[in-house]
Amino acid sequence: MAVMTLRAEGRASAEDVWLRYVTPARWPSWSPQIRAVHVDDERIVPGTRGEIVSLFGVRAAFVVESVDDERRRWTWRVRVGPVRLRLFHEVTHRPGGSATTLRIEGPAVALAAYAGPARWALGRLVRG
């Protein structure tokens, strides 16, 4: 099991970034690798289950483990075939905007493959 941590800063307010995170219908707008999200909940809550469809048609099942609106943190598990990842997200206020941190646990090869798209998406997430 490997761990990777990524961080991005931008002009978007922490409130706006948090709303982009907790609203699955908005994920494709800032995460270019996501083509669609199939989920029943309009806003993530612990226990939310769904499926992400990537640009290449790869489907990933997910379940949200925790959501802390006050601290702007959430955790979820994602499964793509036999590959399982656990992702921890946090949004913080900073002067002039916000920052987001993503910590991912999973197989090293999966983390290496996901690093580029994840960095790109995080940059778009916090852009004003």
Image: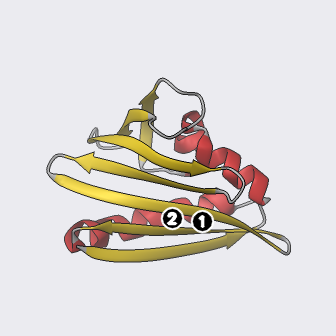
Residue corresponding to mark 1: 123
Q: Splitting the image into 4 quarters, where does residue 60 fall?
A: top left
* Nearest to the observer: residue 32 or residue 18: 18
Q: How many labels does the image show?
A: 2
- The answer to whether residue 4 is above or below residue 15 is below
Residue 79 picture location, percent across and down = 26, 47
Residue type marked 2:
Trp
Image x and y of residue 25, in percent = 56, 33
The residue where tag 2 is placed is 120
Mark 2 is surrounded, within 10 Å at the Cα level, by few (under 14), some (14 to 19) or many (20 or more) other residues, namely: some
Circles 1 and 2 in contact, beta carbons < 8 Å: yes
Residue placed farthest to the left in the image?
82
Q: Is residue 16 above or below residue 103?
A: above
Residue found at the far right of this picture: 96
Look at 76% across and 59% down and name the residue there: 14
Q: Can residue 54 be seen in this view?
A: no
Left or right, residue 55 beside residue 122: left
Q: Distance between the residues labelled 1 and 2?
A: 5 Å
